[in-house]
Amino acid sequence: MDYLQRLSRFLDRPGFPWKRLILGFSFAQYIFEGCLSLRQYGILRQTKPPKALQGEVSQEVFDKSQAYGRAKAKFGFVSSLYGQIQNYAIVYYDALPKLWALTGLWTTRFFPANYRGEIVHTLIFFFTFNIITTIANLPISYYSTFVLEEKFGFNKQTVKLWITDMLKGQALMVALGAPLLSGFLAIVQKTGNNFFYYLFLFSIGVQLFAITIYPIAILPLFNKLSPLQEGDLKSGVEKLATRLNFPLKELYVIDGSKRSAHSNAYFYGLPWKKHIVIYDTLIEKSETEEVVAVLSHELGHWSLSHTTKLFGIAQFHMFYVFALFSVFINNRSLYQSFGFYDEFPIIIGFILFSDALSPMDTVVKLLMNVLSRKFEFQADEFAVKLGYSTELAKSLIKLQVQNLSTMDADWIYASYHFSHPILPERLGALGWMGSDKKADEKSVDEKNPSVASGREL
């Protein structure tokens, strides 16, 4: 692709202020997202629920929901400022070239000559940088889990489990990250200017491998999957799968309650063999028909090819990212702006390229959220056509109350941040006319609230 090479030469301008430009992008995004959060904070100070929910939730539950939302917003202000300071410090004090030089000394001193190439050096740099950033973010993670979530009754982790999960995550990063990063670097080194074609094929292979290996080798390290016991729920889900010609292989229950109060239901697997996983908290807090209604929504995504479409979009996005990376990989002015004058490591180029790409990624995020919200409405409509309108509406309201989630949102904030419509919008689309019973404080189980995680309902 000659135009990519021409673009590469055009952008490689000696003395171009890449550092100021990227810091400017980062600061502008921080200010923009902060302004959106302030708009949302105004919504969180309202004292009455949205009109569509006034007959569904009590004032006490709404007040608690607003308090939880404000607490998360305040924490978001602090954590985003902390992240911005971290990012600025890394760039301003040339942390990347200094760490690259330090890990290079370690490579020379502690590794034999056959293991002193760029790949080994990059692995040491990457894992060292990851450990440093993980330690730097421990206070934020600890506060989120053991102060904020604990205060509102959502945290189920012990400090021991929190630390164990973190150590397992680091071990997995070494075990899986080392060969994947090595493969990434080797492809770029050996395939010339058109390396992005081969990186794209490599990434597809990695995704297929991950789909296969995750439930077998990775998920059991953190949670236990048990076959769903015989009963009304199992028979109801199996009938639904048969009705939709969904290739159901197995039904599982996951012990999500040992770690948090979050709940969800999802499916995974290859096109011809799917597995459905239901959180134990969802089963405990919902009626059988409500759980089936939730799954009718999730299987609606499958039946309407939403998962296939999103997968296809993700592949296109990955291809254009790799193609654009080929424009920047040899950009000496970019490297030199960040303190790399003699060496031009591939991993550093990719990190700096990712920072330069952040404005475009912001636009992509916005467009993907617009599409995702459209898909959510379509999946809800699919459940309605299957006859689960009432059950789905009740389930959504129940989860809304149990998790104290935000009941209203500023429209700009929601457009930018939310991949799902807010509850009043979904109830309106479902044609929900209201229930006879208002959800009150008793609906919120302080010992075991339920929050949608992963792909929310």
Image: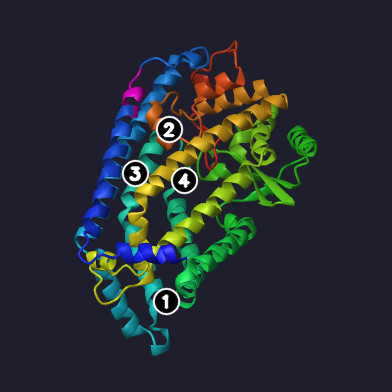
Residue 119: assigned label: 1
Q: Which of the two marks, 2 or 3, is nearer to us in this view?
A: 2
> In the image, what residue occupies the spot 59% across and 50% down?
312
| Nearest to N terminus: mark 2 or mark 3 | 3
Q: Main secondary structure of the magenta part?
A: helix
Circle 4 residue: 157
Callout 1: helix, strand or loop? helix
Circle 3 residue: 143
| Nearest to N terminus: mark 4 or mark 2 | 4
> In the image, what residue occupies the spot 37% across and 42% down?
144
Is the residue marked by circle 4 packed among few (<14), some (14-19), or many (20+) residues within 10 Å?
A: some
Q: Amino acid at mark 3?
A: Tyr
Is the residue marked by circle 1 packed among few (<14), some (14-19), or many (20+) residues within 10 Å?
A: many
- Number of marks drawn: 4
Position of residue 50 measured from the top left corner of the image (x, y, whole percent):
44, 16
Image: magenta residue range? 40-46
> In the image, what residue occupies the spot 56% across and 66% down?
202
Residue in the foreground of this view, choosing between 396 and 171: 396
> Which image quarter: residue 326?
bottom left
| Nearest to N terminus: mark 4 or mark 3 | 3
Is 362 magenta? The answer is no
Is 43 magenta? The answer is yes
CA separation in Å, label 1 and label 3: 36 Å
Vertical arrangement, residue 443 with respect to residue 297, above or below = above
Residue in the foreground of this view, choosing between 257 and 81: 81
